[in-house]
């Protein structure tokens, strides 16, 4: 469900800041929220921008991080393997709020964070990582790449074991947030940035 910003957001940076992270937390928790799926952009090999829609899996307000799950063989993992810039875009049409976040992407494949995320994933979610060959591989005819015996059913836990090697967690450490509110009385826009010690904000012309 969309929640328009509080009227205080029209002239208070503190109110705007208080609007941002709870909105993302709700997006993670509510599958029907427009912020449950976000556009995540990285720099592909060759320097070209690359975007895709990803499910928001976790929000850490204290650490200012967003977490997404992905296939370790995908282009986004290759482009973020060495801590690359990342941008995240979301828009809630009901609230008329756009969020543009940027920072650094770090990929976790074989560590405690990835292990915990895998353990918490449903069997149906794990099935995606059983695809062979990996994402982006050219094939002769349209196909999901899943084992034939698992196309029409959810796998067992043991059947998903081979997929663990293909599972990765992408953590976006956010250091800049651009907030835009489309209001009939006049749009509002604010940008927040952190130097690692704390966040500061300023108003911008929309």
Image (spheres, rainbow, N blue to C red):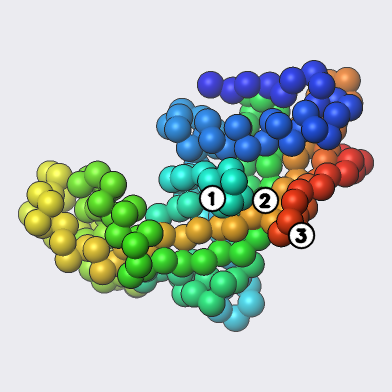
Where residue 186 sits: x, y (%)?
A: 89, 26
C-beta proximity under 8 Å, tags 3 and 2: no
Q: Is residue 170 left or right of residue 110?
A: right
Residue at image mark 3: 195
C-beta proximity under 8 Å, tags 2 and 1: yes
Kindly tell me whether residue 140 is visible in this rendering: no
Mark 1 nearby-residue class (10 Å; few <14, some 14–19, many ≥20): many
Q: CA distance from mark 2 to mark 1?
A: 10 Å
Residue at image mark 1: 66
Foreground residue, 19 or 195?
195
Kindly tell me whether residue 128 is visible in this rendering: yes
| Relative vertical location of residue 184 with respect to residue 166 in this rendering, above or below | above
What residue appears at the point 69 percent right and 31 percent down from the top-left corner? 19
Q: Is residue 124 left or right of residue 199?
A: left
Q: Quadrant of residue 35?
A: top right
Q: Quadrant of residue 22?
A: top right
What residue appears at the point 34 percent right and 62 percent down from the top-left corner? 112
Mark 3 nearby-residue class (10 Å; few <14, some 14–19, many ≥20): few
Q: Nearer the viewer, mark 2 or mark 1?
A: 1
Residue at image mark 2: 101
């Amino acid at each position: 469900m969309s929640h328009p910003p509080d009227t205080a957001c029209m002239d208070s940076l503190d109110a705007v800041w208080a609007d941002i992270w709870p909105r993302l937390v709700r997006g993670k928790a509510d599958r029907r929220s427009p912020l449950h799926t976000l556009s995540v952009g990285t720099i592909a090999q060759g320097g070209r921008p690359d975007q895709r829609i990803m499910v928001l899996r976790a929000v850490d307000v204290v650490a200012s991080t967003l977490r997404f799950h992905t296939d370790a063989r995908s282009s986004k993992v290759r482009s973020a393997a060495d801590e690359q810039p990342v941008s995240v875009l979301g828009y809630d049409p009901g609230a008329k709020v756009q969020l543009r976040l940027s920072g650094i992407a770090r990929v976790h494949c074989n560590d405690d964070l990835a292990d915990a995320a895998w353990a918490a994933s449903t069997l149906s979610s794990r099935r995606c990582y059983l695809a062979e060959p990996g994402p982006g591989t050219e094939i002769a005819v349209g196909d999901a790449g899943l084992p034939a015996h698992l196309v029409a059913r959810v796998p067992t836990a043991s059947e998903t074991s081979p997929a663990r090697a293909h599972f990765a967690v992408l953590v976006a450490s956010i250091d800049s947030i651009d907030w835009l509110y489309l209001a009939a009385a006049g749009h509002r826009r604010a940008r927040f940035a952190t130097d690692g010690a704390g966040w500061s904000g300023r108003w911008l012309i929309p």
